Amino acid sequence: METTLSSFPLPLLILAVVFVLIAIRQVGRFRLRIWQVMLGGALAVLLLGQITPLEALLSINTDVMLFLFGMFIVGEAMDRSGYLPALADRLFHRAHTREQFILFILLGMGLLSALLMNDTLAIIGTPLVIAYACRFGVHPKTALLALCFAVTIGSVMSPIGNPQNLLITTYSQISQPFWVFLIYLGIPTLVNFLVAYVILTRFSPVEGGECQSEITENVIMDQELAKLCRGSLAVILLLIVVRVISGPGFIPLAVIALAGAAPVIIFSRERGSVIRSIDWPTLVFFVSMFVLMQSVYLTGFFQSSVDFTAIQSIPLILGASVLFSQFISNVPFVALFQPLIVQQGISIRGMMALAAGSTIAGNLTILGAASNVIIVQNAEKRGYTLTFWEFFRIGLPLTIANCAVYWAFLSLV
């Protein structure tokens, strides 16, 4: 036994401790945040000599970090100016029933997450959804579940919808990623919106629940910043169109995000407060994750012990992605396993199954996606929460149905 333990790679032991702590997030009286745990793991492998400082520095994917930085600035500016709440007001005011409100959350927040990234919508969408749930008399927990499922499902069909899709696009160098994701995953994603609506409205209480949110009118608070936000969105959409037409090498995704953030950074008088208020802990999480996962990869453990030729079929890729993402979360899963799978010559359909499975994993449990954790933490600040069981009892049938839809469609195209 001692020989086995001594020969077991230390980075894997550290990785195991990290994800146990992420799962329990409580040590005695201390409440641990996910980014703190991941940072601790990265520091551990550095201090214990499991990865050199140079290797750690080179492991950080600058394209991903710059993209996240740019999109977080755009999202924070939209929220701070009141522009996003104003857009939400236009959307939700069209709802006439509680069920329509649930559908609008799924479609509206879901489609926005394909453009602004699901973690961004999780941050700025939580207070909006709670406030409108109170206004419509919808059970707040059902509204929060709808938001969780919306940003997860909607982000599937875009290479910039979530961090794991961004990693897949970056690592695999897919040609014309926006078209590829839309062609392979667009239709089944729209179908899965409807699947989520049916399951939510049948198995989760639509009305009821205590309302603790102050209901206010959503108006634009900073006209100047709102105008810059409109410019930012226009720049992002324009560059995406140019990239789709010209090919993936013409405009890197990081350039699209930074160009979108440029109007706010250059022209806004609020640039300092916007930059200070972005989700820095999530950026720390990603830097730390890259370092820790690279140290694990350098051990060669998974390369020698996992037979990736056995998980080349669509259903196995979907199943493995959903299952593993529950234990190590979807972004670390893709960061750790994606390079190995690419080396096996996986097909485009297999790549899309990896994107769909690792993303839809977020619908199974709260820990399946960082966006779920963000939503739950933001809701708890406002007096609401979702328990593991409340999420799982709806998420289990939804995830099974979602995977079946993607499996069926990817088997046909």
Image (spheres, rainbow, N blue to C red):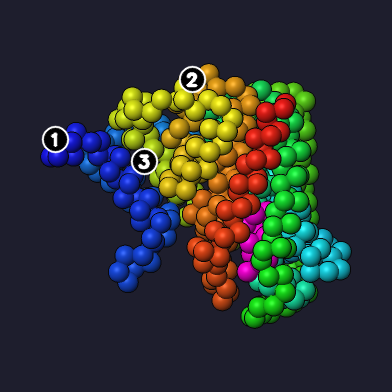
Q: Earlier in the sequence, mark 1 or mark 3?
A: 1
Q: Which amino acid, mark 3?
A: Leu
Residue underneath mark 2: 344
Identify the residue position indicated by label 1 in the image: 3
- Sort mark 3 into few (<14), some (14-19) or many (20+) by Cα contacts within 10 Å: many
- Residue 145 is inside the magenta segment: yes
- What residue is rendered at 50% in x and 63% in y? 388
The kind of secondary structure element at disc 2 is: loop
Category of crowding for the residue at label 2, using alpha-carbon neighbours closer than 10 angstroms: few (below 14), some (14–19), many (at least 20): few
Boundaries of the magenta span: 141-150
User: For the residues marked 3 and 2, what is the alpha-carbon distance in whole angstroms?
Assistant: 23 Å
Would residue 176 appear left or right of 162 to someone viewing this image? right
Q: Select label 1 or label 3 by which is in front.
A: 1
Q: Residue furthest left?
A: 2
| C-alpha gap between disc 1 and disc 3 | 24 Å
The quadrant of the image that shows the C terminus is top right
Q: Specify whether residue 169 is in view.
A: no
Q: Secondary structure at mark 1?
A: helix
- Whole-percent x, y for residue 80 in the image: 67, 63
Three-letter amino acid code at disc 2?
Gln
Q: Which residue is mark 3?
A: 292
* 1 and 3 marks in contact (CB < 8 Å): no
Compared to residue 10, the image places residue 390 above or below, namely: below
Residue 61 can be seen in this image: yes
Q: Position of residue 229 (x, y in %)?
A: 74, 53
